[in-house]
């Protein structure tokens, strides 16, 4: 082999390889002595700086603790970046088994059970299943075990490089409140300490929290920065246990605060489209944008640069406003896998000022979520109609989240589907179908005359599962033609459909419904995440179906 063809691996990588092989062998139930041999070998390579030369010379087996078979494995990996033993072990085990068993308290047996019975293959999927109480119906699990597993998942997730927006915002809010109540600056506290960066743009996932601090007259830069860093350290120690978010600060004097705030907030594409000079004296963002002949552009929109064009053309006002959603669909109750009664969900929606709410528990094929049998449907319909009489001030729509079966048909026969006020068609199984088959499956569901919403289009779970391999543009075009609303699922673990499909949604005039996918009253508040995503997508109010009034939505649901 020529020198240029050699792909040297480091000592740490070799150690990681041997440790993973041993771990996978343990999960597979291999001979304990064999497992122990890999553990000893992993320890033996620690501190060995000459692995490459030894591999080339064939002398790895001279290192105490490394036998002939393992030396051959190391040689292939060090010189060729090949690990056939590891590849074979990975293929022989259920996908996700290793990751799941890293959760404290979740051994191989229970992990296999979760994979087999719930189709859980990642930490994000496991977290989602716990939050939907899906473990409670499994043999050998209970509320205490589910809570322990959820705590373990949260710990594992917190050690990764990124976390979801739903985790970041509460920390940011606590930090700003912490600064308000703690006296780090004395009587000369900076006027403004504000969110900025990707956090302020409401990016779906983040690795750090950015803040901008105003440096005011009468307090030196050194004093301000020392106080800020002290506050951050104190907050991290007392309020951020288990979280690995980094906090980063930007500083700006009062006369350019607006300019710097806009600069640190916007993406590269936004800043390029703005075409700002290197420095603009502006104490507020409104002043900054005004000097460039632009209206103020909301932070969550500052992504692609297209928002700048719309602003120049006076079209930005057409985008859905932050308070534009009039009602919500896609909520779950104790009838399936929710944690609250229908009444509790309705009263919370009313408290939050919504004009209507759509109740949509899981259909019968979703056995893992206690999907409703026909007899359950009759009971639920009766309860909803009774609640409607008791609460005429909020419209209650009776619906269902119907599974899209493998062939594209919907759960339940037509005689049941026609009873609902609305049907959300969603995929919850058979995620691994190929692109053509999965696309055809969804298209058939769109063509079903009872489908009004297409739930969490790609099935992605942020930081846990990629979306299905589907022809998204083709589906968007067909949904627009059939007057089916594509869901902007506001659950912070989903945020699906991705806002980056905004141009296609607008191109085809596809309707979008911003739904919380709430499983408890608190989950209704997640709607604001979906609103932020819709605004990032620059979707006009006219395309948001639940920006309509009660009468308008009733007309649309009945296809009048």
Image (cartoon, rainbow, N blue to C red):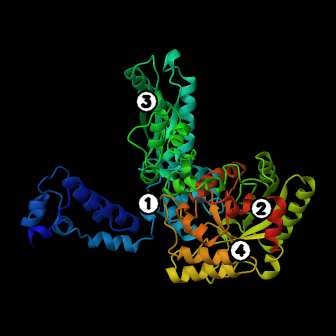
Mark 2 residue element:
strand
Left or right: 442 in relation to 302: right
User: Residue 475, image x and y in percent?
Assistant: 59, 76
In this picture, is 120 found above or below 175? below
Checking the image for residue 233, the label placed there is 3
User: Residue 319, image x and y in percent?
Assistant: 64, 56
Name, please, the residue furthest toward the left: 57
Answer few, some or many: residues within 10 Å of disc 1's Cα (few below 14, many 20 plus, some between 14 and 19). few
Q: Are marks 2 and 1 in contact (CB under 8 Å)?
A: no
Q: Are marks 1 and 3 in contact (CB under 8 Å)?
A: no
In percent of the image, x 72 and y 63: which residue is there? Answer: 545
In this picture, is 136 found above or below 119? above
Query: Would you name the residue on which mark 4 appears?
Result: 483
Left or right: 97 in relation to 295: left
Query: Would you name the residue on which mark 2 appears?
Result: 359
Task: Tell me the distance, in whole angstroms, between the alpha carbons under discs 1 and 4.
Answer: 41 Å
């Amino acid at each position: 082999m020529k020198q240029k063809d050699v792909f040297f691996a480091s000592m740490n990588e070799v150690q990681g390889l041997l440790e993973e092989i041993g771990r996978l062998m343990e999960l597979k139930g291999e001979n304990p002595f064999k497992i122990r041999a890999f553990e000893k070998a992993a320890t033996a390579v620690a501190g060995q700086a000459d692995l490459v030369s030894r591999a080339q010379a064939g002398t790895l087996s001279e290192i105490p603790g490394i036998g002939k078979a393992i030396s051959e494995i190391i040689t292939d990996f060090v010189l060729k970046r090949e690990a056939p033993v590891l590849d074979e072990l990975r293929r022989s085990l259920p996908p996700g088994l290793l990751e799941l068993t890293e959760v404290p308290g979740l051994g191989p047996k229970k992990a296999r059970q979760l994979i087999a019975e719930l189709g859980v293959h990642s930490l994000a999927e496991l977290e989602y299943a716990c939050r939907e109480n899906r473990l409670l119906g499994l043999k050998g699990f209970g509320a205490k075990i589910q809570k322990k597993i959820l705590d373990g998942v949260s710990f594992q997730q917190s050690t990764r490089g990124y976390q979801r927006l739903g985790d970041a915002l509460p920390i940011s809010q606590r930090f700003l409140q912490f600064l308000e109540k703690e006296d780090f600056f004395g009587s000369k506290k900076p006027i403004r300490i504000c969110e900025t960066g990707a956090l302020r743009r409401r990016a779906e996932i983040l690795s750090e929290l950015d803040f901008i601090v105003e440096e005011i007259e009468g307090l030196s830069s050194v004093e301000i920065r020392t106080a800020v860093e002290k506050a951050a350290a104190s907050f991290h120690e007392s309020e951020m246990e288990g979280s690995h978010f980094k906090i980063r600060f930007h500083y700006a004097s009062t006369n350019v605060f607006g300019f710097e705030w806009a600069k640190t907030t916007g993406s590269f594409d936004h800043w390029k489209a703005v075409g700002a000079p290197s420095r603009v004296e502006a104490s507020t963002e409104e002043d900054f944008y005004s000097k460039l002949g632009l209206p103020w552009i909301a932070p969550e929109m500052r992504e692609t640069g297209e928002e700048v064009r719309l602003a120049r053309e006076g079209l930005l006002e057409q985008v859905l406003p932050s308070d534009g959603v009039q009602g919500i669909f896609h909520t779950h109750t104790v009838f399936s896998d929710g944690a609250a009664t229908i009444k509790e969900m309705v009263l919370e929606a009313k408290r939050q000022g919504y004009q209507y709410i759509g109740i949509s528990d899981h259909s019968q094929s979703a056995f893992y979520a206690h999907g409703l049998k026909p007899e359950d449907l009759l009971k639920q319909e009766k309860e909803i109609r009774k609640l409607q009489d008791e609460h005429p001030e909020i419209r209650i729509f009776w619906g269902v989240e119907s599974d899209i079966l493998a062939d594209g048909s919907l759960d339940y026969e037509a005689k049941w589907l026609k009873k609902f006020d609305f049907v959300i068609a969603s995929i919850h199984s058979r995620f691994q179908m190929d692109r053509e088959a999965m696309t055809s499956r969804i298209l058939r569901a769109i063509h079903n005359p009872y489908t009004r919403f297409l739930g969490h289009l790609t099935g992605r779970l942020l930081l846990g599962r990629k979306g299905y391999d589907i022809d998204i543009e083709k589906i968007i075009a067909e949904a627009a033609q059939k007057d089916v609303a594509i869901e902007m699922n506001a659950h912070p673990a989903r945020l699906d459909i991705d806002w980056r499909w905004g141009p296609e949604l607008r191109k085809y005039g596809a309707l979008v419904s911003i739904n919380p996918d709430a499983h408890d009253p608190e989950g209704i508040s997640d709607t604001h995440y979906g609103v932020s995503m819709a605004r990032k997508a620059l979707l006009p109010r006219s395309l948001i179906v639940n920006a309509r009034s009660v009468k308008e939505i009733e007309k649309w649901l009945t296809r009048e």
